[in-house]
Amino acid sequence: MVEFKINGKKVQAEKGEILLDVAKREGHEIPTLCHHEKLGSDGRCRLCVVEIHRGSRRRFVASCLYPVENGIDVYTDSRDVLLIRKTILELLLARCPGSDTIKNLASQYGVFDVRYTKDTDKGKCILCGQCIRACESIVGVSALCMSGKGPEKKVTTPFDEPSEVCIGCGACAVICPTGHIYIEDKDGYRTIWRKKFELARCPKCNRFHAPIEQLEFISKKTGVDMEELLICQNCK
Amino acid sequence: MNITLEQLDTISLRYIDAMSKYSKIIKICCGTGCVSSGALKVYEELKRVLTDRGLIDEVLVKKTGCHGLCERGPIVVLGDEEILYQSVGKRNINEDITALLKTIGENEIVDRLLYQGEDKGKRYISPRDIPFYAGQKRIVLSLNGIIDPEDIEEYISKGGYRALYKALLMEPEEIIEWVEKSGLRGRGGGGFPTGTKWRSCRVAHGDIKYVVANGDEGDPGAFMDRSLMEGNPHSIIEGMIIGGYAIGSNQGFIYVRDEYPLAVNRLIKAIESARSYGLLGKNIFDSGFDFDIKIFRGGGAFVCGESTALMSSIEGKSGEPRAKYIHTVEKGLWEKPTNLNNVETWACVPHIINKGWNWFASIGTPNSKGTKVFSLVGKVKNTGLIEVPMGITLREIIYDLGGGIREDKKFKAVQTGGPSGGCLPEAYLEMPVDFDSLTRLGSMMGSGGMIVMDERNCMVDVARYFLKFLVEESCGKCTPCREGVRRMFEIVNRICNGEGKKGDIQHLEELAHAISLSSLCGLGQSAPNPVLSTIKYFRDEYILHIEDKKCPAGVCKALIKFSIQPDKCTGCMRCAMECPVKCIKGAKKEVHVIDSTLCIKCGTCYDVCRFNAVTIE
Amino acid sequence: MDVDTDQLDAIIEKYNGDRSYMLAMFQDVQRLYRYLPKQAIYHICKRLEVPFSKGYEVATFYKALSLKPRGRHTIHVCLGTACHFRGGPNILEVFERELKIKTGETTKDGNFTVETVNCLGACALAPLVRVDEQDFGKATQALVKKIIDEFRDEVKS
């Protein structure tokens, strides 16, 4: 049992639990962007940073990664924490001025405009990395990666070319918090990450559903017959 | 091969005996600096001439490591620190080789090759005479410039690997106690107590542990680690083996910057020879302890000097740091307990074992023990590496050792700690240099880089320089650093270009504060320091740039104009000849004029004019 | 560009097929081909059983690696602090002007690539220029022209 305080209130948690989870459970709101319930976090966006006092020591940590500790005093809305949140949201809004997700979140914290030149080439990508992690851990093909470093860093497939291993499942597009990833199903084809996939037609309802490649991948991995997989989720 | 202490002694005696057969010894510094000035040519040519004259068996010509006096290179030392010659072979290699032969043959000192000091009347013959050297306390650098870094036997003859032998007879617990009591703190910039780190790693859970030497010295203006890795690689290796033994690790890694190919080579050679002498490998000194070292070469990323980024790089990934809520001593390389220290820290260890922890603790200040190597560069008369006891003041370093400001200009600021540090003005010259004093003022000692600036350095431009550097080197993982530092750069860049706005300073301070608190790693957390320290101590300069659109130092191109004063110009044509864009017009003996529409404001005319006729407005 | 997979396999062998040394393998490949060809990354990743995307991530992270062919000679102009304040940027400008290319680019005849580097560790000899493995300290405009002539001639012979 670990005992500490959040915003002056005493809380208890299991050893090894993450601060963000405990705070949420106790009803303290902490905004996040790069954190995912199932995939965890890398600590990239820094939006969940909170203030921790331990004795006379003051620290600012990413609550999505910080393991709970005995005797600490956590502040989720101190003056500095709010400054950090506003700063990060303003910076992200300047980077992705077209993102409604960021706009809405920013306005919640009093950020409506930016004092910087807005970027036009970053789309809605905030480099949270969730798409990469999903492709790596959940799907298991690692079609996506970060390329470059610093402000030029971006998420892409190798050489910005259609990926050999991408199965067109669209997990990356689903998990993306800002809807940055382009995915289009049209006329029996899916286009994602510059690759065109032939969609499978359900033998029962005749509608297009998943890419054939994706079904082949699942078939290979699970041993389930293609015939069964061709039937769409609605008709099953 | 299992080496014994007796064998070490035998090697030493054999080496000393072999050296005694030579009547004269000539040591040529072959560190990166001197090599770029032509030292290797001097070495080859000297050997050739001596061979031709049949003297090659009498006169030993040796390559040594970096003295740290790179500006005066190639440096040649004759005998046992008897005579130091500077700039050998720079102007005329044949003449200088002749001079060397004259010195050893006829015992005649050639004055023109002697070190040129401040006092033109004084002769500086031995390195010990030179104030730059005399004022130092060389422990880590004690063998730099004396031994051939590629000769393990020479290292052994100077006492090398005796500390290892002694340590392997001690209990690991005792070694850690010694390191703790010595007060050694990390030399890479962090200043974390080394003994404490070793202890945490020792008690960490797990059978497999690693020790790492950080040789990724990336601070621009700093070359302490380069000099050490090139000049005395065995001292680092010896320290690591001792550390491995104390911590309970059998595998070490040295991560060397890609931009230091000579250091990489020297370390590879040193490891190979240590292996062949049984000082690395299985059952060292028959103690039952195995240890070996692998070398990793960096890929040109400054961020890989950060410990978790470095480890990520060793694991074969990109160099992105990770949060250190769980320390690397518990989960580091491949999730195993890993102890990382800077190469300079490792090099201190054999000295502590040999001479005792209380000897080390007797040097320095109460909280900063021992000596520190600094790279003193910029506008001082003597630039180079210096090793001094902690607690020495900035004034002593800059004026006593550094010889004061070049061309007797006015001191303006000293920048310490690289891109993580800050600039301090004249008022703080009495500050002692140690881990804590400078940090309190908004700067930091850092890894040892010390850049001296004069009235021709613009502090806003200095801030812009460091911000640009950090923008390029940021790994891009976290929002505050990736987005925030580039926005700070944009603001400061605008200010330098005459587009500063009211409120810019406050904006910078606020942005800097948020970035320093929320960034994931030390790079981002300390990125604001150059900006914040220059705003703190040179606020007026910022205000002049923003409100008056003026750059008093005459640096920010958008705010200055070069012109020639007619009453001072003699028409010597020098500026016109040197001008890279040929924008200066004027006939011989006639007043010259700069065409400001073509002028690129490089400052060449200002630098070459002998009559102070060029003004910067 | 076709890569010699035997050479690549030899490089992989040199490091015992240890995926931790992928960066080192890439650097060795670059020494052979003067850049890091896509096929080389692909082949090495296949052999090391590392996702191609991870190899690409490493290849684009480290400044020492180039995915575009570099010139026969790479000129590195140091822009470390000491070099910056002692005229490094001017030296860079002169190279760009004389060779008619911008930093990061290669001359049309394939002779020279100009890059910047953040500190070579020879700060007392600022400003520094490194051409391939050779260092030139206290660089001046005259030295820049000399370097271009010297290395250009070398190519001809």
Image (cartoon, coloured by chain):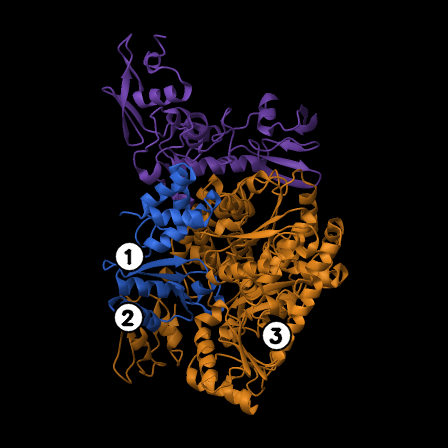
Chain colours: A purple, B orange, C blue
The residue carrying pointer 1 sits among few (fewer than 14), some (14 to 19) or many (20 or more) residues within 10 Å by Cα, namely: many
Task: Give the vertical position of C116 relative to A136 (above or below).
Answer: below
Left or right for B230, reference A198: right
**Residue A65 image offset from top left, x and y in percent:** 57, 33
In the rendered view of the protein, which quadrant contains the N terminus of chain A? Answer: top right
Between B427 and B318, the one nearer to me in the picture: B318
Q: Is residue B295 visible?
A: yes
Rendered location of residue B112, percent (x, y): 50, 86
Specify the label residue B133 is tagged with.
3
Among the 4 quarters of the image, the one containing residue C157: bottom left
Measured Cα–Cα span from mark 3 to mark 2 = 40 Å
The residue located at (73%, 50%) in the rendering is B172
Residue denoted by label 1: C106
Q: Which residue is mark 2?
A: C149
Position of B173 relative to A137 (above/below): below
Secondary structure at badge 3 equals helix
Chain bearing mark 3: B
Q: Which residue type does callout 3 highlight?
A: Tyr
Q: Are marks 3 and 1 on the same chain?
A: no
